[in-house]
Image: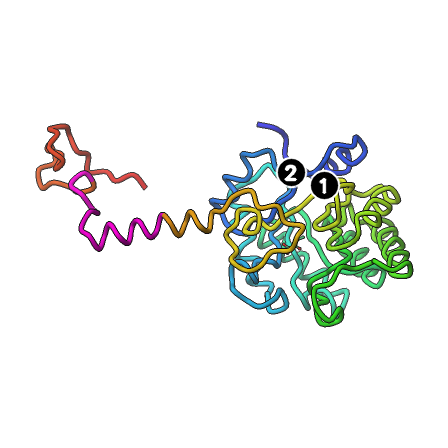
Amino acid sequence: MKDKVTKITLLKMKRKGEKIAAITSYDYLSTRLIDDTGIDCILVGDSLGMVVMGYDNTLPVTMEEIIHHLKAVTRARPRAIVVGDMPFMSYQASVEDAVRNAGRLVKEGSAQSVKLEGGERYVPVIEAIVQASIPVVGHLGLTPQSLHEFGGYRVQGRDRESADRMISDAKALEKAGCFAVVLEGIPWQLAKKITESVSIATIGIGAGPHCDGQVLVIHDMLGIYDEPLPKFVKMYEELGERIKGAVSAYVRDVKDGRFPGMEHSYSADSRKDPSGDSKDEKDDIPR
Ligand code: KIV
């Protein structure tokens, strides 16, 4: 068993030029599977609002929902560092709110760090959370909680002025104490420049190949989410179709009387297997 990944591990990986692999997870079993793969970082993202809860966007997600899913994920005791996302309005209104809510993600959800969206204007918030000994990941670019400010999901930082602002935002987050920053939906040239300009780890999503690491929403890369996907998603499986195929086969079997068969049934005589074998049948049911 390799050592637990911490913020120090990710900073060392950045220094050594070792790529960081991150993914979202929202439940116990997926986390156990994912953690066996060598993943470095698991994000309990507010994307759960869309892929788990069925909301139109991430804005309705509550602290209770994030904590509920964080608890499920951290119960798997993953080796990967677990980042808990701070939902909309859990850190925007005041520094005090932000510290208390970040603390809840760690204390109640057992998160090992928290992530929040926004640049320089969140420096006081980030500094206060870091002061409370909670590691912070920043998030710049197409930050989904600013959906209405952007007027939709649009690539950010394409013009010179906004690109320069994002570079100075990234430097401000580094100075405020973030150990990593997610760069979402920005030109690869800008992501490269930011990655070269800061000593903290950059984790890209729709930000090209030059970031220190990458993150994807698990439902997107497994092909479960049935809405149109952005071009930056690489679909590694079409699990949605496979799930439909498996459940359709089950429905047909039940309706046609093919399931359950005798091999799935118990006998009144515990020494006789109903399929005809005379082997012992145990009363204990594995669960
Ligand atoms: O909520 C989320 O899953 C995220 C990632 C897409 C970075 O913020």
Q: Residue at x 70, y 38 (%)?
A: 20
Question: Which of the pair 90/27 is nearer the observer?
Answer: 27
Image height of 29 relative to 57, above or below: above
Q: Badge 1, how many Cα within 10 Å: few under 14, some, many 20+?
A: many
Instruction: Kindly indicate whether the residue at mark 2 contacts the one at mark 1 (C-beta within 8 angstroms).
Output: yes
Image height of 253 relative to 282, above or below: below
Secondary element at image label 2: loop
Is residue 21 located in the magenta-colored stretch of the structure? Answer: no
> Which label belongs to residue 227?
none
Main SS, magenta region, reads: helix
Estimate the x, y position of residue 90 in percent, counting from the top left: 68, 65
Q: Residue at x 76, y 49 (%)?
A: 181
Estimate the x, y position of residue 242 in percent, counting from the top left: 42, 47
The residue that mark 2 highlights is 40
The residue that mark 1 highlights is 213
Estimate the x, y position of residue 191 in percent, counting from the top left: 81, 48
Q: Residue at x 73, y 63 (%)?
A: 154
Estimate the x, y position of residue 239 in percent, counting from the top left: 47, 47
Q: Which residues are magenta?
A: 246-263
* Front label number (1 vs 2): 1
Question: Which of the pair 8/106 is nearer the observer?
Answer: 8
Question: Which of the pair 112/166 is nearer the observer?
Answer: 166
Image height of 282 relative to 163, above or below: above
Secondary element at image label 1: strand
